[in-house]
Amino acid sequence: MSRYNIQRTDTPLEQVTDISSNTNVESEPTNNVPVSSSPKKYVKMTMFNRFIGQFDPFNFIFNMGVGISSDLLYGFPYPARWLKICSYIMFAINVLLFIFQQMMFIMHIIYFSRKYSKREYFNKYFRNVSKNVFWGTYPMGLVTIINYINGLANHFYSEGKIVVAKRMLRLVYVLWWYDIIVSVIIAWGISFIIWQNYYFQDGLGPWRYKFEKMAAEHIKSVLLLAVIPMVVGASSISIFIMSDLATLALTRNIQLLTMVITTLIWLHAVIFVFILLGIYFWSLYIFKIPPMSQVFTMFLVLGPMGQGAFGVLLLTDNVNKYTQTYYSPNDTNNILLIAVPWCFKSIGLLTSLALLSMGYFFTVITIVAIISYSRKRYPGVKGPGNTTRIYHFHQGFWGMTFPMGTMSLGSNEIFVQYNEFVPMGAFRVIGTIYAVVAIVWTLYCLANTILLYGRRSYNALKTPIEYVPEENEMKLEPMVSHVAPETDFSFMRERESSEDEGDTTMEEEGEASIDSMDMERQERGLYPELFGRSMSNPMGRASTYQYGVEALHTPLNPTVSRFSREPTLHNITTSP
């Protein structure tokens, strides 16, 4: 009967020590296949495996950033011919990127389901809170393409190409229905999955209870990604449903029905968003601002604020357009035809100003939060001697592009609708600032992402075919590259601030409480570096599966992993 003793040493897996015979047996790998006493299955990592493994629902955020930039260039607050030419290029990149991502998604789900099972795919990409909310980026990336095609349809309509314009508008209308159905399924389905049961692929980690892990690690602004698509979809249809071209291509009943459905979706989505914002504000008060690797996610709050303001302005203006198009004034209803639409427009203006004010507030707060990390240095993931700074690019930078674009749309729309009545030039300037930041930031992220994936492809070509454990075959690259894992614990932040300021004298009660926490967690059999500061891990370490980085949380005393009956592969020593 063998017994497994797990030790943290540097002995390679190929070397197995047999205590009973007191001899060392070294097994040479055959055909690059590692030999281990653990009954693990190894698979050959081909280029196709590595290529498919690059897909992640998060990747559709690239379409969001590039797509919103193309829309902003096409409808820039200060229009110019060269800006529209640039928008054609961005639109082409966005379409090609979306088609590529769609193909990657199809191949990934087919390969993964055949290799493992559909249930395992569902568990990993839909039940897993670290990944399922990012499916919301798919309909938001698609809606940027829909909006741009609508702009092209109006352009053909203005040039007298009525037939082509009507066909394009009907295509836009069909795509919109597909997008809004997917958005509702994601919002309702993902929310129900999250509410139904706890599911953590990486186990509880340092937490004792499931709700502790959920509150500390997953009550983040990324939860909004599952709901924002409904806000974006409601705003998208409002752009063209009451346009002159839509009046020719669609019937009156279709327009009215679409407006009613859009209003219901917008109201439902905004209420849902504010419920999540209340929970997120609670998380900020309890766990403070996110760590450096996640601080750019604070920009996600701007998305529903800007897009919500843009949508409500269009919805209320469509009521005015509908009454002017289908009702003729006379002595009895003349007052109603003026009063009713303007009541809606007044409500829309006040609501949009309220939403934009919150967006401006969170813009400043997020920028200040980023600046607060300007002097911080953390160990990088490339190895010892590498440090990570706040300005080092990682894919989390993409979280800033789309929200900035929505704030531009919402601010500029106030100028477009109300400048003829009241001077609103300031909102045009604000919209221009947001648009420039969104476009420039998108170009910066796009260039760095191309370099990032170029390096990965080059390294993959240079790397010889190797064998890896079967469960690691579909391990993805870190979603946030070149960012060391960090923790959200508030007492860790207190330690950091005190050390950065050179203050070595902490309050006795606070230090005693911190020490007691560390001692209590040590007694539970977990490594102290998961919670406390150390020279090799100065900011502490928490569960990092949410970034796609595999973190090994090995107990000190137990002979098997807390979450598996099989022995861990860190190092294995057998004894009789």
Image (cartoon, rainbow, N blue to C red):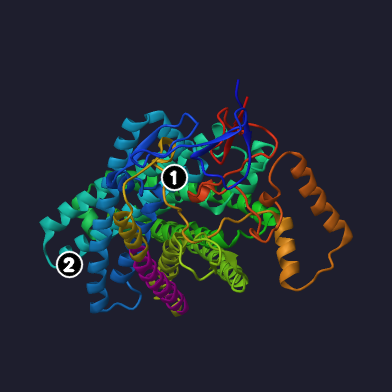
Determine the secondary structure under disc 2.
helix
Q: Which residues are magenta?
A: 426-450
Quarter-wise, where is residue 23 in the image?
top right
Residue indicated by mark 1: 264
Please determine whether, in this image, residue 130 is positioned above or below residue 88. above
What residue lies at 21% left-to-right and 58% top-to-bottom? 245
* Residue type highlighted by circle 2: Ser
The percent position of residue 92, horizontal first and vertical second, equals 22, 62
What residue lies at 68% left-to-right and 33% top-to-bottom? 558
* Residue type highlighted by circle 1: Leu
**Residue 442 lies in magenta, yes or no?**
yes
How many marks are shown on the rendered structure? 2
Residue 333 in view, yes or no = no
The percent position of residue 495, horizontal first and vertical second, equals 74, 62
Please determine whether, in this image, residue 259 is positioned above or below residue 361. above
Residue 505 in view, yes or no = yes
Which quarter of the rendered picture does the N terminus lie within?
top right
Residue indicated by mark 2: 158
The percent position of residue 183, horizontal first and vertical second, equals 39, 44
Secondary structure mostly seen in the magenta stretch = helix
Whether pointer 1 and pointer 2 mark residues with C-beta atoms closer than 8 Å, the reply is: no
Q: Earlier in the sequence, mark 1 or mark 2?
A: 2
